[in-house]
Structures are given as C-alpha cells and as structure tokens.
Image (cartoon, rainbow, N blue to C red):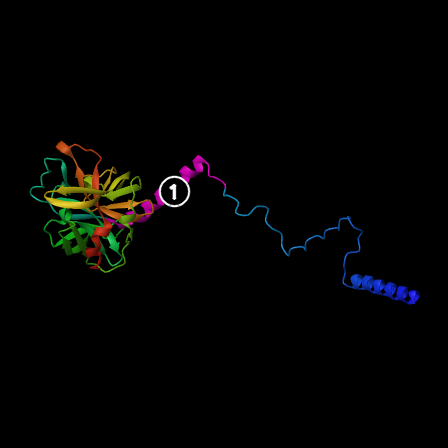
Amino acid sequence: MAVVVGVLIYANLKGIAVERQTNHFSTYPFGQAIPSQAPPALPYTLPAQVNAPEPELSPAATATAVQEAMNQAVAKVRPSIVAILRPASKTLQQGNPSGLTFVQPNNTGNTTTGSGVIIDPAGYILTTFQTIGKAEEVKVKLFSAFQNQLTAEVVAIDAKTDLALLKIDAPGVYPAIGIGNSDAVEIGDIVFAIGTPYGFSRSVSMGIVSTSRRKISIDGRFYPDLIQTDASINRGDDGGALINIRGELIGINMAYFIPDNHFTGIGFALPINDAAMLLGRI
C-alpha cells in the first residue's frame, strides 16, 4: 500500500512540473535574477531632440530683417499715395493760437496741394476736408500714371471725422492700400507718415506711436481717440497715410502741434476704424 501511495505522489509531482514547463513558468533557482528582455524595435528612429529651439539671430541679422520689413512696407504703400491739387485759396486758414491745428495744404503759385490715399482698386480715395475745401472735384496725381493728372469727384464728406471720400473718374484698376485695425495700435509701434509735404510727393517719415487715444479739441471740434506720433507731419501732408510696419493703413494724417509756427514733431492721425461710415460708401 505504501508503495502505491509513493508512486501516485511521484506521478502527481512530475505532472505539475510538466504543466509549469508547458505554461512557460520560470524554472530559475530561487534568488537568481531573471534576465530582462529588450523592448521591441520601433519602426522609425526618434529625433535626437524634440522641439529644439530655433537658433537666435545675431544683432546684425535682426537689424537687417527689420530694415527689410520697413522697405517692403513702404514700397508696397507708396503707389497708393496721391497728391491732390485744387485751385489755390486766396488765404489759408490761420493756425490756432494754441498751436494745435489741422494740417493745411501747401500753396504753390496757383495750386494748393494736399495728400490722399487710394483705398479701393476702383479709384476711391480717402483724404481730409482741409485738402479739398469746398471743391466738388479735384485733380489727383498718381505715383505711376501715364497721365499727369486725373479728375476725382467728391463723393461724400463726414463732418464728424473731418474726412472726405473721392472717386477717380477714369475707369481702371488702381493700387489700393490694405486697411489695418487701428484698435490694435499700441504705444511704441513703428509707423510711417506718407504724403506730399510742401509739394514733395510721396515723402516718407518714420516715428513711433506716442499714444493711440489722445483726446483733443481742434477749432471747437472734439476728437476722442487720435493717434499721436512723432513721425514728421508738415503742411501738405493733410490726408496722407499713417501706416504700420506691415504696410497697413491705420490712420489719416490731419493735425499737428506748431506753436508760433515752429515744428515740434507732434502730429495726429484719425484712426482708420473711425472712417467706417465713409468706407461703407464704397
């Protein structure tokens, strides 16, 4: 009987060992480390460094990039700037004794010259009331036109903003400027004023935004949010463009501070967003 029991125990233990080997259980002696298996190979090679920072530009390269951006902005906009001519007034409006006044056109002989900017390829031009006066039509001089002068009709005047909308009579596709967002203008932004100061057509001056919400009164008219800049604005720049470094129109030059007729470098432009009424007439 004991022999039979022993045989059965032996057979049972052997069956368990066979089952463990069949189920791939470890048979390494107790305390001996089981060798680890290598992870499966990936189908691609990971980059050495993910999201590696871009190399920094040298000061010279940064200056060159800024200069190129300025050149491109001005080159893109200058064809949109026009000189506006009308018969000379007998007398020009006298400056405000306080020195804060609207920019006046420039008188040269029998012609008064101001500035304007083409805002639509159909030939719509934005300028100031000071530029056109009481004229119902004026002459405009384009940057690159086969004709020296084209006739433009006064379409609308917005007394609230002191702006005027003109339309060139001759059909064609004209170089229009891109319209920016004057609400996004910040103090310190680089800007360019482009116009026809003293008859020098499409002259460019550069400055920064001193403030984008200057509250001032000019000749009894209140303006709540003029853009103040130190870019040079002179007689004849009225109606010219104030653009940002991307070449977008953000304002129309319209006023300056010249106490005792002395240049101060303080100019003002009406934010282009305030011209919504006239822009809606196009």
Vertical arrangement, residue 116 with respect to residue 228, above or below: below
Magenta segment main secondary structure: helix
Quick check: 154 left or right of 271?
left
Q: Which residue is mark 1?
A: 68
Nearest the viewer among 89 and 194 is 194
Is residue 237 part of the magenta span, yes or no? no
The percent position of residue 155, horizontal first and vertical second, equals 16, 57
| Identity of the residue drawn at 38% across and 42% down | 68
Q: In the rendered structure, which segment of residues is drawn in magenta?
A: 55-81
The percent position of residue 61, horizontal first and vertical second, equals 44, 38
| Identity of the residue drawn at 30% across and 43% down | 186
Task: Label 1, secondary structure: give it.
Answer: helix
Quick check: 20 left or right of 137?
right
Nearest the viewer among 279 and 46 is 46
Vertical arrangement, residue 64 with respect to residue 175, above or below: above
Quick check: 100 left or right of 23?
left
| Identity of the residue drawn at 16% across and 52% down | 164
The percent position of residue 144, horizontal first and vertical second, equals 27, 50
